Amino acid sequence: MKNTGDETAHNVTITNATADGNIFFNFQESKLSGENLEPGKVTELGTNSMVLGFGNFSISITVSCDEGASSTSSVIGLIFGPFMIIP
């Protein structure tokens, strides 16, 4: 995730995650490792989730912060058991 704004985003959290396709996705709300994200900085998302499946899938994740901004992104990929390939 990248902060493309002009201000630091505080208390950045994953507020929603959904999965479609041949996938079992056990989402639990989780905070990013760095709660504050400064302008232009990039960080990886992390959840306390278990993922299993076989075949094609898509995942949508919504991230929000205390400033009221939110963003939703989607990815498609291929999964074999616990191993995912996201191009």
Image (cartoon, helix red, strand yellow):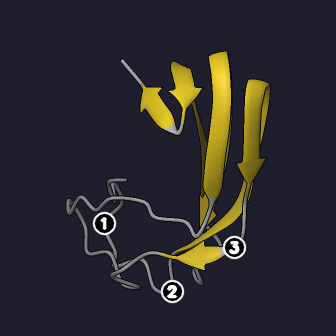
Query: On the rendered structure, is 7 left or right of 39?
Result: right
Q: Nearer the viewer, mark 2 or mark 3?
A: 3
User: Which residue has dot 2 on it?
Assistant: 11
User: Which residue has dot 3 on it?
Assistant: 29
Say which quadrant the C terminus sits in.
top left
Q: Residue at x 36, y 80 (%)?
A: 33
Label pair 2/1, CB-CB below 8 angstroms: no
Q: Residue at x 60, y 76 (%)?
A: 30
Q: Which element carries disc 1, helix, strand or loop?
A: loop
Mark 2 or 1 closer to N-term? 1
Q: Residue at x 79, y 27 (%)?
A: 20
Residue 55, position as x, y percentages in the image: 64, 13
Residue extending furthest top?
A: 55
Residue 40, position as x, y percentages in the image: 20, 59
**Do we see residue 76 in this rendering?**
no
Q: Nearer the viewer, mark 2 or mark 1?
A: 2
Q: Residues within 10 Å of mark 3 (few under 14, many from 20)?
A: few
Q: Nearer the viewer, mark 1 or mark 3?
A: 3
User: Which residue has dot 1 on it?
Assistant: 6
Q: Which element carries disc 2, helix, strand or loop?
A: loop
